[in-house]
Image: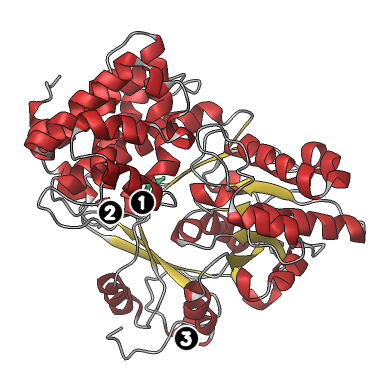
Amino acid sequence: MTSSKPRLSNKSLAALSSQVVRPTYDRANIQTGLVHLGLGAFHRAHQAAYTEQALNAGDHRWGIVGASLRAADTRDALAPQDGLYTVAVRDTDHTDYQVVGALKSLHVAPEDPAALIKTMAQDSVKIVSLTVTEKGYCHDPATGDLNVAHPDIQHDLAHPDQPRSVVGFLLAALAERQRQGLTPFTIMTCDNLPANGHTLQGVMTQFTQLARKDLLSLVSQDVAFPSTMVDRIVPATTDADRDLVAQALGVTDAWPIMTEPFTQWVIEDHFPQGRPDWGAFGAELVKDVLPYETMKLRLLNGSHSTLAYLGYLSGYETVAEAMADTALAGLIEDLMVKEITPVLTLPQGADVGAYRRSLLTRFHNTALRHRTWQIAMDGSQKLPQRLLSTIRERLAAHAPIDRLALGVAAWMRYVTGVDEKGQPIDVRDPMAAELRRRADQADLNAQQLVPALLGVEAIFGKDLPAHPAFVAAVTQALDGLISKGARASVAAMPRG
Ligand code: CS2
């Protein structure tokens, strides 16, 4: 950090430049109503920002205690700031700044698992929310089942009081509440998983069956697992961003968030222990989230992953740079219009044309430096719900899948770990080693690579590798990517 300005904290709040929005409530007097697991940038830009509005409106029950499940960096940056952080909302021509006060305190789970369980078991806690990314569910992405062989699950079965996994923490805290005679909290997942609440309840139920059979009916019947659809683009913060925020605030923030003006939250309204009035601040409370979730996962995230792999291989660092390539932007639009939308079941009253247009505008936002490499992470966990479920429905309808197959092939090319110039790619994925091993055993040749990678059942299931039209389309696309490269493959795709 280059700034010599004072650090953001309760004390320096008064010194903030006047156009910065800040908490209007007394931070010392808010209760802990929510515990959030997975205190990444996304939570702080999204759910915490909605909750901040409830606190600002005078409902002081909903302070948040955040927990990081792995690294200490967020706590180390935010503890000296009394949990305060900035949300910088960036449009192409201006930026708005808000300092959020909702975060009361922070845990680093591995440092003291028992302390986190104790916090989750406090009577005032009514909701435990999660943004732990797809891989945090320790499940098999193709089936949604608990991966019992996962090392964290094995660990938690052996050491239930010192958990490492999310499901281990949730069960330990529910057990502790039961012991104290307290009602269970509501568990609200905010990750980009299909039917996320049901998926988590399924994984939790399977884990409980193995770990605490006596709590099975509690977990499978009494605990509420509302599904949610969450949407806001939140790129990783850079040092340049920190400098920009320091300039605007007049104080230094080590851990600010950069995001876009757009934000959407659709929530299944099932909170037996109450919830903040998020609906008053723009969230949509509905009975069935599934159609919203599917629309977002397939149109936004499906396009995002396709852009990430094709964009990275084409040499584009950010989504906005990739979108400035008219051939790639055109491919993404056609992917949405011709291949994804026709097999979508839309939410009632949704204007899918307007939704698509807004996605394209958001992807073009040059003020956000959203790296293709960031979105490319964890593809093994993302592909099933983002691209493969659409592909299955297209195949069942005997409909063409050229652009979807190009997205899958670009992922395959990417996970070989070497780019088109022969440079290494830093592939981040829980399955990276296995993917690399499979790729290395094959030559850089579509006929060998496609079956090698389609053999990963946790991603592709049993059906897709056996589907001739799918195998043929992916092989043809990968052959093009290998022989002529990503840019030329994109340019060769017919438009309109
Ligand atoms: C992105 C998402 O990194 C990714 O995989 O596709 O984080 C995306 O930006 C959000 O889902 C937008 O709501």
Q: Circles 1 and 3: CB distance less than 8 Å?
A: no
Q: Is residue 315 above or below residue 252?
A: above
**Beta carbon at label 1 within 8 Å of ligand 1:** yes
Q: Quadrant of residue 496?
A: top left
Asked if residue 314 lies left or right of residue 402, the reply is left
Q: Position of residue 249 (x, y in %)?
A: 35, 77
In the structure shown, which secondary structural element does the residue marked by tag 2 occupy?
helix
Q: Which residue is mark 3?
A: 12
Query: In this view of the protein, which residue sits in the foreground, 133 or 90?
Result: 133
How far apart in space, not on screen, are marks 1 and 3 (Cα)? 37 Å
Q: Position of residue 45 (x, y in %)?
A: 45, 58
Amino acid of disc 2: Trp
User: Farthest residue in the front direction?
Assistant: 441
Task: Tell me if residue 398 comes above or below residue 135 in the rendering.
Answer: above
Q: Neighbour class for label 1 at 10 Å: few (<14), some, many (≥20)?
A: some
In percent of width and height, residue 27 lies at 63, 75
- Hey, what amino acid is under mark 3? Ser
The amino acid pointed to by label 1 is Met
Classify residue 297 by image quadrant. Answer: top left
Q: Position of residue 288 (x, y in %)?
A: 61, 28
Q: Which one is nearer the viewer's eye here, 408 or 220?
A: 408
Residue at image coords 52%, 87%:
11
* In this picture, residue 22 sits left or right of residue 359: right
**Residue occupied by mark 1:** 377
Q: Which residue is mark 2?
A: 373
**Dot 3 crowding, Cα within 10 Å, few <14, some 14–19, many 20+:** some
The Cα atoms of the two marked residues, 2 and 3, are separated by 36 Å
Q: Counting residues from the N terminus, which is met first, the one under dot 2 or under dot 3?
A: 3
Instruction: Kindly report the distance in space between the C-alpha atoms of the residues bearing marks 2 and 1.
Output: 7 Å
Q: Residues within 10 Å of mark 2 (few under 14, many from 20)?
A: many
**In the rendered image, is residue 217 in sight?**
yes
